[in-house]
Image (cartoon, rainbow, N blue to C red):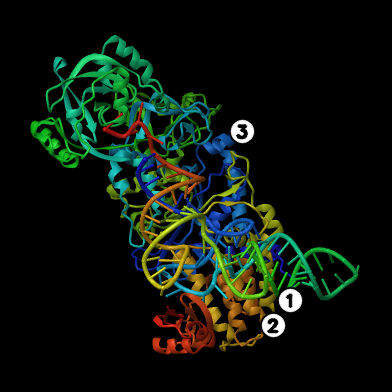
Amino acid sequence: MDKYEPTQIEPKWQRVWADARAFNVPNPEPGAVDEKRWYQLEMLPYPSAKSLHMGHVFNYTMGDVVTHYHRRNGARVLRPMGWDAFGLPAENAAIREGGHPRDITEESIVLIREQMQRLGWAIDWDREVSSHEPTFYKWTQWLFLRFFERGLAYRRAAPVNWCPNDQTVIANEYVVDGHCERCGALIELRNMTQWFFKTTAYADELREYELPPGGEWPERTKTIQRNWIGRSEGAEILFRVEELDIDLPVFTTRPDTLFGATFFVVAPEHDFVEAYASEEAKEYAKHAGARRAEDRAAETVKTGVFTGHHATNPVNGERLPIWVADYVLMDYGTGAIMAVPAHDERDNEFAQTFDLSVRTVIDDDGRLVNSAQFDGEEAEVAKASIVAWLRNEGRGAPAISYRLRDWSFSRQRYWGAPIPIIYCDDCGVVPVPDEDLPVLLPDVDDYLPKGKAPLASNEEWLHVDCPKCGGPATREADTMDTFVDSSWYFIRYVDPTNDEAPFGREVVDYWMPVSQYIGGIDHSTGHLLYSRFFVKALNDMGMLGFREPFARLYHQGWITMGGTKMSKTRGNLVGPDDLVDEYGADAVRTYILFMGPGDKDKEWSDAGIEGIVRFLRRLWRIVGEVAERAPEGRAAGPLTRTTHATIARVSDDIGRRFQFHTPVSALMELLHALAEDTSAPDARFAAETIVSLIQPYAPHIAEELWQRLGHERLWEQPWPVADESLLERSTFELVVQVNGKVRDRFIVETGLSDDELVERAKASERVQAHIDGAQIRKTVVVPDKLVNIVVG
RNA sequence: GCCGGGGUGGCGGAACUGGUCAGACGCGCCCGACUUAAAAUCGGGUGCCUUCGGGCAUGCGGGUUCGAGUCCCGCCCCCGGCACCA
């Protein structure tokens, strides 16, 4: 047989698949529901570099194996691909390289698409979408308007994260340790008028996972999201400022310590300061409020100033001095706290610093003291009874507070979807009418970031007539965060050419939720949370019939280089091209999955790829031999059982365990067994099975060998099924232990009774030597496995 | 501090619900065959120690069990999330 030449066979089969439209999956006829379907999705790439890296190769190959597996198990499988084309990564790449972001992005898309096709991934290219195309962002804008109508997208002035390097606001979710997640610059706090999505309206729903049957999310991801949302149960309590005749609400998780409050603190940004505080306090607040939370937290000594007023504790009428201090944060709770230095570390530090009084109200046994009628109650009980008392007095109520903040999504950058809003002097904030969508992203002379939206400098585009009154008006010049695009791209795939709506409900409800999503865990508090928010909101709008976008979620581990994740900014990218040239796509695909468990980080090294290449060459040679010499038919032989066992193992690993490296081992073992005798009566069956099972990993060689074995179109052959009856053995190796130590092993028939097995075990000479003369205390039998004789 | 994940040969890793002297499969290394030679290929060996009887080994120390990498308790270390969030 000729030599294995991947460079010959791979392009050939890629053409065959394309011509046969092998992986294009039309939507079902209306009304189809009971058909088996599978929506396989991996996070779409940013086309910001001109090449994929091995991390992508890993991720998409895993998705490819799952795709083939479900296709061949009879499911209608949707497996799309697209481009997260808008946004900072692409725009920054364009700035670096010079040129228009659109040109740079589209060049990258062409190159990456070619790489994907060279790797032979089973993608339905008819469904390709790119977030920078007007046909896509028209609907991003349309969806924004639906959120806007419901108050789920709104505009307000707020302190936001400003990246001085990227010259734009970025979301809380992408500030890491006070630095920009993209470029690493130190984030500044700026007070700006920005657009927000009201993610907090779904805080509770986002903490719960309304997954369909069979759905499953990793525990660690749920934990990350729950930590991020940060729900605290407590109470809101009103403190009266008698001399001003106003109420100041506080949020506390410890209403049981209400009698221990000895002072009161408001955040520097609190309205109370500006309205009523002393000049000294105002001066303090001006400086303190301008500082970032991280800097405030880093302060070792607490600072603050007395405002000159007092608040009355509703439970005992005590007058507490109101201070302003920067350890209280405006954007959590109510921006004001009751300070209980005896039972709160921070309040205690403050009390020590300013010599304020401390009163213990919970004793060592966890019971209330110094708390009037509540004395003696356990703290947990007292929480409820004090809140009940307050509620009765009209001075408090149970309350819940979240750490989650609304998602700030307006960006002062060029390369994004324009926000379809018009500002009119008379009518105010006016949404662009649906029929005027899309608001096209115009060309501008200078799209470099300058701290204000580049679109604002395009006067011709900026000035429009108000859609309401026809008077002079201006467009919103900020663009949308790229994460808005990725919050719904996976829905567009199911209906990518719809020009009446972003998607049709029936077809969305057929395909979705996504059966299996694969992507990085770094998106846990960003993209994955935003997407869930979108789907829940769209469900409430009646646009789709489910409440979670992704039924099953899997996080692949990183492919690292020098210990860090491969990424463009770190400059440690290894692409697939050289490896594909040298070893072929099949070897690259199989190797990257064989490297180890899918969810673990792996340091990149091509040192082991030779092992896979040897395996594929051996496969080529041995299957070739079988095709020439092995008898036709399916007569049973020594290989039959091993072959069926391998089918069961591989299917279980891929289908149930989602484990992709062990099937390769199993197939290597079966190949070794087959190589023993390529003219055995069941050699042909074993060879066909190996080829069939390796197809998701190495589809090109599999297709070629399948043809040489006299068959056609392996990609649409049913996945092999293990014959249970052939898996059963008539004999097995009985392990005999004495006191837990293996003393003998020999072959016996299956199905013997426990007593018979014990008799056989005792009959063994080697066992005899260990039990002779001793008292048998107990025998343990694991049917068809082992006998343990306990002597003593 | 709170929450989650993890720790097995020189390396990647296997052992799925406690059950075949733990270490499959691959890499690397060693030996051999073929070759003038090399590559490729094929075959064999490869946890540690050993007085060659055996002993010790799945981060450490206990425990449960006839039997523990797997279960329980207590530590240690690594990775990730949250943290002046009242």
Alpha-carbon distance for marks 3 and 1?
Answer: 52 Å
Q: Considering the numbered disc 3 on the image, is that residue within a helix, a strand or a loop?
A: helix
- Residue A1 badge: 1
* Residue at image location 42% in from the left, 39% down from the top: A438
User: Callout 2, which amino acid?
Assistant: Glu
- Residue A96 badge: 3
Mark with earlier residue (1, 2): 1
Q: In which quarter of the image is residue A287?
A: top left
Q: Looking at this view, is A565 or A345 the one in front?
A: A345
Q: Mark 2 points at which residue?
A: A628
User: Callout 3, which amino acid?
Assistant: Arg
Q: Considering the numbered disc 1 on the image, is that residue within a helix, a strand or a loop?
A: loop
Looking at the image, do the residues carrying marks 1 and 2 touch, with CB atoms under 8 Å apart? yes
Does A337 appear above or below A60? above
* Residue at image location 14% in from the left, 39% down from the top: A377
* Residue at image location 32% in from the left, 46% down from the top: A206
Residue A523 shows in the view: yes
Alpha-carbon distance for marks 3 and 2?
Answer: 58 Å
Q: Position of residue A182 (x, y in %)?
A: 52, 36
